[in-house]
Image (cartoon, grey):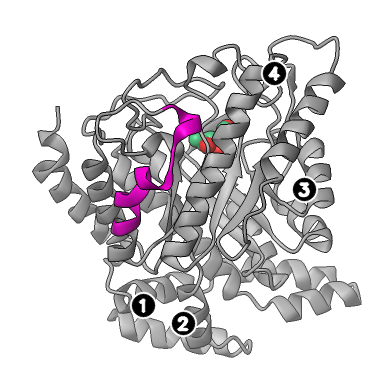
Amino acid sequence: MTIRENYAYAKAAYEKWGISVDEVLEKLKMIPISIHCWQGDDIGGFEVNRNELSGGIDVTGNYPGKASTPEELRSDLEKALSLIPGKHRVNLHSIYAETAGEAVERDQLEPKHFEQWVSWAKENGLGLDFNPTLFAHPKADDGLTLAHPDREIREFWIRHCIASRRIAEYFGKELGTPALTNIWIPDGYKDIPSDRLTPRQRLKESLDKIFAVAIDEAYNLDAIESKLFGIGSEAYVVGSHEFYLGYALKNNKLCLLDTGHFHPTEAVSNKISSMLLYSDKLALHVSRPVRWDSDHVVILDDELREIAHEIVRNDALDKVMIGLDFFDASINRVAAWVIGTRNMLKALLYALLTPAKQLKALQEEGNFTERLALMEEFKTYPFGAVWDYYCETMGVPTREAWLDDIKTYEKAVLSLRS
Ligand SMILES: C[C@H](O)[C@H](O)[C@@H](O)C(=O)CO
Ligand SMILES: [Mn+2]
């Protein structure tokens, strides 16, 4: 059977449930995933005075072919994007600035340092998102930044965050789509703090100063990302979930939920509906924690599907900004992007092909037997046939065929890098 024949059979099966598969595919086309550039170079960046990665995060693995210049990183991203159906976004960190060999301090960064990224995004029809980088820097060596007891250090990072929001504003203006600026800080303590409040007061004051600079939401949206613990901040993280949830609600900012930043049995999928009752928008860093915030490549597991269900069945596709956050240096880095992004899209397609209305009604009627039975039966509906058809019509390889492109690219490009 051909891909189209399989699709016709699958379509009929879903249409029996009132699901218009063609409409589903039109919807899927419109969902942008924000693809994090840092999977391509192990969060290295291009600073002239580059520092070791810090901030309680770590990248493990030594797969050859890592990008070490902006041109290489963009070329790798282009290769990945050519294997992923749809139009997406690229998420940058400030350490990916291009400063023509000049050492520019992070609080002095300007839009001009990202001009090449913007022209590349224009050429490729991409949106850009942004992150100030509050780690891998001498002023973050003790693991404190916006909550630092030293006012000068705090002021430095405040200036950096404001500069970052200005850069994102420039992205938004140039590309016609608002950039999401996400602030994540590593601040915390390895051991039991004697005072949890004071650092949080300082973080609140720092954020107030950062956001006192008004930027039109048509160009820039602000998000704040919480965390439970990091390497070296096991006992206490200043920017906890409760801290940012409160701050975001009070100050009309987006909470960014990273799926690796909670207790291992705590599910982000279960938070989305509650948070959307009180906020217009929220953001995600979809990752895969394995025993801890390990940032493994996203797979099509139960939690990923549940996240997609929560976004789709609650009609929140334009409210939840989906970004990815993983960094695996033990496998081909371009393949990592492709695997993770295709899986995010597969999860969304799976959710779009679920008879959500009927399942909701069954729950309301208290018919839990049928609810469970249908949810399980839909797991073996011919979803793969729809995915294959989508890939084919979007001009990207179907099934595992994309691996051949990766192998060719590895041989012709990655293996030649030192
Ligand atoms: C590099 C990213 O900004 C970083 O991963 C952050 O988003 C995070 O999740 C830290 O644990
Ligand atoms: Mn994250």
Q: CA separation, marks 4 and 3?
A: 24 Å
The residue under label 4 is which amino acid type? Arg
- Asked if the residue under mark 2 is in contact with the one under mark 4, i.e. CB atoms within 8 Å, the reply is no
Instruction: Give the residue drawn at x 50%, y 43%.
Output: 325
| Circle nearer the N terminus (2, 1) | 2
- The kind of secondary structure element at disc 2 is helix
Q: Is residue 95 above or below residue 154?
A: below
Quarter the C terminus occupies: top left
Main secondary-structure element of the magenta-colored stretch: helix
The nearer-to-camera label among 4 and 1 is 4
Quadrant of residue 360 within the rendered picture: bottom right
- The kind of secondary structure element at disc 1 is helix
- Tell me the residue that label 3 is attached to: 248
Q: Quadrant of ligand 1?
A: top right
Give the crowd class for mark 3: few <14, some 14-19, many >=20 residues within 10 Å: some
- Tell me the residue that label 2 is attached to: 10
| Circle nearer the N terminus (4, 3) | 4
The residue under label 1 is which amino acid type? Tyr
- Tell me the residue that label 1 is attached to: 389
- Tell me the residue that label 4 is attached to: 151
- Asked if the residue under mark 3 is in contact with the one under mark 4, i.e. CB atoms within 8 Å, the reply is no
- Asked if the residue under mark 1 is in contact with the one under mark 2, i.e. CB atoms within 8 Å, the reply is yes
